[in-house]
Image (spheres, rainbow, N blue to C red):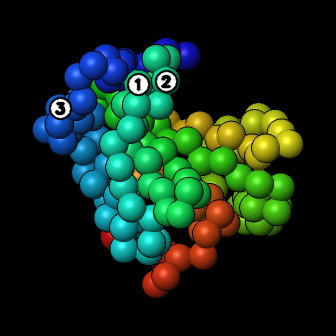
């Protein structure tokens, strides 16, 4: 499925450009970024991912990536790569995932380099399920509450 993203590598988008594109989902965008910045030592950086996926906010620390956030028209998507042990943690907590994320997780194959999970965030329950995935990847500093 193709979503309207910021694909022009020559023009780095501003925060305003990103927020305008996300539209009605801005509060969800801000809420999850606030959660990640409060609970993890990973720093955000705006990067061009590929011609197909465009610009993204990557959370990175010491050469390791926590996840990517891709702004889209009236939504945004997250890419999180889970190793085998991390995927097993999510499997054990599957009851804490909403139906959308359960389906995405089940349909995503575990590869040698990880399970590349792409989630389109459209509602609060998607964010709550994303927190389960993030916490399986890295233990949060404080609690795991999304405010």
Q: How many discs appear? A: 3
Q: Secondary structure at mark 3?
A: helix
The span from disc 1 to disc 3 (Cα, nearest Å) is 13 Å
Mark identifier at residue 54: 1
Whether residue 67 sits left or right of residue 82 in the image: it is left
Mark before the other along the chain sequence, 3 or 2:
3
Question: Which mark is in front, 1 or 3?
Answer: 1
Say if 92 sits above or below 7 in the image: below
Residue 56 or 12: which is nearer the viewer? 12
For the residues labelled 3 and 2, the Cα–Cα distance comes to: 19 Å
Dot in front, 3 or 2: 2
Marks 2/1: CA–CA distance: 5 Å
Residue matched to label 3: 17
User: Residue at 65% across / 41% down in the picture?
Assistant: 117
The quadrant of the rendering that contains the C terminus is bottom left
* N-term mark: 1 or 3: 3
- Say which quarter of the image contains residue 36: bottom left
Mark 2 and mark 1 in contact? Answer it, CB < 8 Å. yes
Residue 132 visible in the snapshot? no
| Marking on residue 50 | 2
Q: Which quadrant holds the N terminus? A: top right
Q: Residues within 10 Å of mark 3 (few under 14, many from 20)?
A: few
Q: Position of residue 10 (x, y in %)?
A: 27, 19
Considering only vertical position in the picture, is 116 above or below 29? above
């Amino acid at each position: 499925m193709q979503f309207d993203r910021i694909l022009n590598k020559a023009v780095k988008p501003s925060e305003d450009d990103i927020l305008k594109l996300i539209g009605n989902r801005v509060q969800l965008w801000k809420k999850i970024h606030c959660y990640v910045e409060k609970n993890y030592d990973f720093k955000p950086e705006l990067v061009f991912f590929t011609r197909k996926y465009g610009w993204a906010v990557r959370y990175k620390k010491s050469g390791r990536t926590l996840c990517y956030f891709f702004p889209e028209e009236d939504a945004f998507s997250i890419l999180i790569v889970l190793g085998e042990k991390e995927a097993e943690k999510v499997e054990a907590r599957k009851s804490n995932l909403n139906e959308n994320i359960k389906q995405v997780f089940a349909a995503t194959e575990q590869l040698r380099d990880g399970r590349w999970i792409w989630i389109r965030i459209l509602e609060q329950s998607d964010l709550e399920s994303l927190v389960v995935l993030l916490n399986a990847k890295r233990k949060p500093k404080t609690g795991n509450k999304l405010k």
